[in-house]
């Protein structure tokens, strides 16, 4: 060290601003009683298909809204609007994840007082979104059977942050040669904290369990 | 590649701190990154080399301290360090659900003049 240099101890979280904003967002949703689910997965695991089916069954009796993030295009937002729920698109450009400030901005476009369940469809990515608190109530991580049983071993960090893991595309499990026992064992060792539901948005298997899971947490909703 | 955003945030905090101290140059930036944080030290270095231009840290070096994962075993009532992402207690083998350390993304200290 040069004679005239000095050390400044800081010990401050680098994402402090994001985390503080996320805390305020969480508090606000707690006060108005909205369940906020941060939905995460790799690209193509079936987030949008799941939300389409979920909205078509849930929204008629339990007011929902969606914030959807993508690098480019509003294709997912257009698909989701068909179910009648309000959808706000966030186009992130080169940013590979959503941040709390983007959620705050998107929320200003939604009527949140009537919203019981807010889904945040994160950018398809199993790495970057794990580090960013969005103010969600709970995290839902999807794993499609076509991705293989060892995905949780390869991307442990995101699976460890999950409250619920949805194993999707179960209608393809046989064709994909998906080993259910193996994935059960992998999830139990990597993400013992998470509940797991096996489902298919296409044939409806497991959808009741998923909708019940939401209903129990959204309080007054009736599915 | 969210490391560029993390480095930009770190440099923002570093510049604020350096200015508060009346410093005109940052020589060293030290970060503490948990092994569970989902942030890659190599990518941080690359991002730092790009992002430090036009800042007080343009000639600074980056040091990244890797923070080990520490879990709590509820059975044995003890803390243990885990090198693996399977948090198995070395005494009883039970998988821990409680991470006590390893998610840090922190600006630790600066050297300035």
Image (spheres, coloured by chain):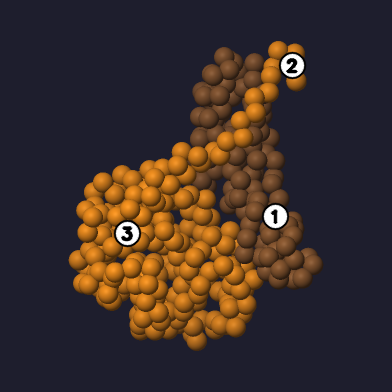
SS of the residue under disc 2: loop
Quadrant of residue B53 in the image?
Answer: top right
Task: Chain letter for mark 3, please.
Answer: A
Rendering colour (chain A) = orange
**Residue A30 % position (x, y):** 36, 55
Q: Nearest the camera: A41 or B89?
A: B89
- Whole-percent x and y of residue B73? 70, 64
Residue at mark 2? A2
From this view, report whether residue B112 is shown above or below residue A9: above
The residue at the point 64 percent across, 16 percent down is: B113
Q: Which residue is mark 1?
A: B70
- Quick check: can you spot residue B51? no
Q: Are marks 1 and 3 in contact (CB under 8 Å)?
A: no
**Residue name at image x 47 percent, y 77 percent:** A197
User: Secondary structure beneath disc 1?
Assistant: strand
In the image: residue A158, left or right of residue A1: left
Which of the marked residues, 2 or 3, is nearer the chain's N terminus? 2
Splitting the image into 4 quarters, where does residue A116 fall?
Answer: bottom left
Percent x, y of residue B54: 51, 23
Q: Quadrant of residue B82 in the image?
A: bottom right
Name the tint of chain B in the rendering.
brown
Using the image as rendered, state which of residue A52 and residue B58 is in the foreground.
A52
| Marker disc for residue A34 | 3
């Amino acid at each position: 060290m040069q004679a005239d240099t000095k050390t400044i101890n800081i010990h401050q979280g680098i994402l402090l601003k994001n985390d503080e904003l996320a805390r305020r967002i969480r508090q606000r949703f707690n006060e108005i009683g909205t369940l906020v689910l941060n939905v995460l997965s790799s690209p193509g695991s079936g987030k949008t298909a799941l939300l389409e089916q979920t909205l078509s069954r849930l929204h008629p009796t339990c007011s929902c809204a969606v914030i959807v993030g993508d690098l480019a295009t509003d294709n997912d937002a257009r698909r989701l609007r068909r179910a009648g729920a309000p959808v706000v698109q966030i186009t992130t450009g080169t940013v590979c994840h959503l941040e709390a400030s983007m959620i705050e901005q998107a929320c200003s476009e939604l009527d949140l007082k009537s919203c019981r369940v807010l889904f945040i469809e994160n950018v398809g990515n199993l790495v970057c979104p794990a580090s960013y608190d969005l103010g969600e109530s709970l995290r839902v991580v999807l794993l499609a059977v076509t991705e293989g049983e060892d995905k949780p071993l390869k991307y442990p960090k995101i699976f460890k942050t999950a409250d619920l893991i949805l194993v999707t595309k179960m209608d393809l499990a046989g064709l994909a040669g998906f080993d259910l026992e193996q994935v059960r064992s992998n999830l139990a060792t990597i993400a013992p904290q998470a509940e797991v539901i096996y489902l298919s948005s296409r044939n409806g298997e497991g959808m009741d369990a998923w909708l019940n899971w939401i209903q129990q947490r959204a309080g007054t909703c009736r599915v | 590649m969210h490391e560029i955003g993390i480095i930009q945030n770190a440099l923002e905090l570093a510049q604020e701190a350096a200015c508060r101290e009346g410093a005109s140059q940052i020589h060293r930036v030290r970060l503490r990154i948990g092994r569970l944080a989902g942030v890659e030290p190599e990518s941080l270095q690359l991002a730092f080399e790009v992002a430090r231009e036009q800042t007080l840290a343009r000639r600074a070096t980056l040091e990244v301290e890797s923070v080990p994962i520490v879990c709590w075993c509820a059975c044995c009532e003890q803390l243990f360090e885990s090198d693996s992402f399977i948090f198995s207690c070395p005494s009883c083998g039970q998988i821990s659900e409680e991470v006590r350390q390893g998610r840090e993304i922190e600006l630790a200290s600066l050297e300035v003049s």
